[in-house]
Image (cartoon, rainbow, N blue to C red):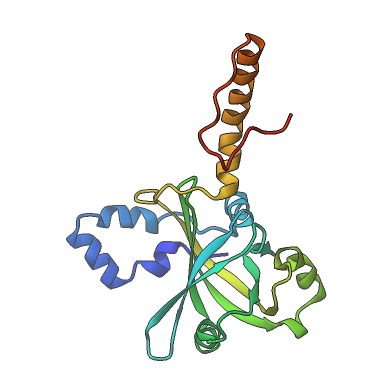
């Protein structure tokens, strides 16, 4: 059984800030929500399409540290009912997050889908598993996402709590794949219009973007 997000996040100082700003009643309602038993289908589906996220750790001096992690969709997988697993690729070799997790395993994640303006916050306990010592099933599960990248270790995060954030102020941004899927109907419509023009004996005008010529027929 997981904890309510409010049970972890709404500390006495946070509750006091809510009272000062007139939102304490909303906070109380959130504190009364049932505790989730596990990550649900909505969360699992969202994680499965994730291509990047931000992870915060805490160092020995008490300072938070935030790092971006990215990969192809599927590089983060839900294993069991409450655990995320992902490959930890070789990077700048500073190992700040690695050292912080060794000292304090508490982490916070934010996963954002900019195209759909959705945002999921997760709190959990993380641990690293060296690549040479990882379970064969885990390696096989995450191998397709690794490509040719060097995997130094795997990161396992047991989720303690999660919360869907409001979509306010999330900038609308599209990946190349998002744009391609959204523009395909328009491109098909233009093709049909050009066919109609040619059928009527009218030469279709050149498309303005030379980098995107007419599609081959």
Horizontal side of 87 relative to 125 (left or right) equals: right
Which residue shows up at 66% across the image and 62% down it? 78
Q: Which is nearer the eye, 126 or 34?
A: 126
* Residue 131 location (% of width, % of height): 73, 81
Horizontal side of 121 relative to 140 (left or right) equals: left
* Residue 29 location (% of width, % of height): 35, 53
Quarter of the figure that contains the N terminus: bottom right
Which residue shows up at 56% across the image and 35% down it? 183
Outermost residue, left side: 20
**Is residue 87 placed above or below 61 in the rendered structure?**
above
Quarter of the figure that contains the C terminus: top right
Q: Which is nearer the eye, 111 or 174?
A: 174
Horizontal side of 27 relative to 38 (left or right) equals: left
**Is residue 21 placed above or below 137 in the rendered structure?**
above
* Residue 69 location (% of width, % of height): 55, 69
* Residue 132 location (% of width, % of height): 77, 85
Q: On the image, which quarter does residue 205 sit in? A: top right
**Is residue 158 placed above or below 166 in the rendered structure?**
below
Q: On the image, which quarter does residue 186 sit in? A: top right
Outermost residue, top side: 200
Which residue shows up at 60% across the image and 53% down it? 40
Q: Which is nearer the eye, 27 or 198?
A: 198
Horizontal side of 71 relative to 165 (left or right) equals: right
**Number of numbered discs:** 0
**Is residue 3 placed above or below 135 in the rendered structure?**
above
């Amino acid at each position: 059984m997981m904890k309510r997000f409010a049970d972890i996040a709404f500390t006495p100082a946070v509750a006091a800030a809510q009272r000062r700003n007139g939102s304490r009643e909303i906070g109380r309602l959130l504190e009364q929500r049932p505790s989730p038993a596990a990550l649900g289908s909505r969360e699992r589906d969202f994680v499965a399409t994730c291509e990047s996220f931000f992870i915060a750790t805490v160092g020995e001096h008490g300072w938070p540290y935030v790092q971006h992690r990215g990969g192809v969709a599927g590089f983060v997988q839900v294993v069991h009912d409450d655990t995320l697993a992902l490959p930890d690729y070789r990077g700048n070799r500073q190992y700040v997050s690695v050292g912080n997790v060794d000292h304090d395993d508490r982490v916070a994640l934010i996963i954002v889908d900019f195209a759909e303006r959705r945002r999921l916050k997760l709190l959990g306990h993380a641990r690293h598993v060296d690549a040479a010592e990882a379970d064969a099933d885990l390696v096989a599960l995450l191998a397709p996402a690794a490509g040719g990248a060097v995997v130094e270790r795997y990161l396992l995060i047991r989720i303690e709590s999660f919360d869907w954030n409001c979509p306010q102020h999330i900038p609308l941004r599209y990946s190349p794949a998002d744009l391609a899927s959204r523009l395909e109907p328009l491109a098909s419509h233009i093709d049909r219009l050009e066919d109609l023009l040619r059928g009527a004996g009218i030469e279709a005008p050149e498309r303005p973007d030379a980098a995107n010529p007419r599609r081959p027929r």
